[in-house]
Amino acid sequence: MKHWTDGFADDDADEPLVRPYTITGGRTAAEREDLALITVVAALSEELAETGRGQRRWQPEHRAILGLCRRPLAVAEIAAALDLPVSVTKILIGDLIDSGQVRARRPLAFAQAGGMPDMAILEAVRDGLRKL
């Protein structure tokens, strides 16, 4: 996917880029607090339902997220694939969750009562990192 800043001249670097602000319709923070970097997002359908008259129109980035989430991806992976800031990505994912296009699920280790990961999982991660 092509980054939206491709083609800008290097001498324009002093000018602020406004595009992420416009992608989100002027919103600067996600309204949802349940979206973490490791939250898994999956599409519920392959087509993006059009909004009704007077409602906000979908941005191309909404469509890109829906396409990426045909298979479950973490919020951080989606942001990296779109080459957008995580904060902007969370806002866009929140729009799709609110419209019923995608669902978000916290990793099972944290979703269970107590919110603490299983010690066996932590040891397996530690052992894997040591092998690197």
Image (spheres, rainbow, N blue to C red):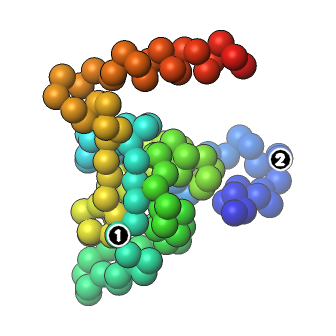
Quarter assignment of residue 43:
bottom left
Q: Amino acid at mark 1?
A: Leu
Q: Residue at x 82, y 46 (%)?
A: 11
Q: For the image shown, how many numbered marks are present on the structure?
A: 2
Q: Where 85 sits versus 123, above or below? A: below
Tell me the CA gap for discs 2 and 1: 41 Å
* Residue at the farthest bottom position: 53
- At x 74%, y 43%, the residue is 13
Which element type, helix, strand or loop, lies under badge 1? loop
Which residue has dot 1 on it? 44
Q: Amino acid at mark 2?
A: Asp
Nearest to the observer: residue 88 or residue 74: 74
Q: Is residue 89 left or right of residue 36?
A: right
Q: Which mark is residue 10?
A: 2
Q: Nearer the viewer, residue 125 or 104?
A: 125
Q: Nearer the viewer, mark 2 or mark 1?
A: 1
- Can the viewer see residue 21? no
Question: Which residue appears farthest toward the left when viewing the image?
Answer: 113
Tell whether 85 sits left or right of 106.
right
Q: Quadrant of the C terminus?
A: top right
Direction right: furthest residue: 10
Q: Position of residue 87 (x, y in %)?
A: 44, 43
Position of 28 relative to 129 (above/below): below
Tell me residue 117's x, y (percent): 33, 23
Q: Quadrant of the N terminus?
A: bottom right
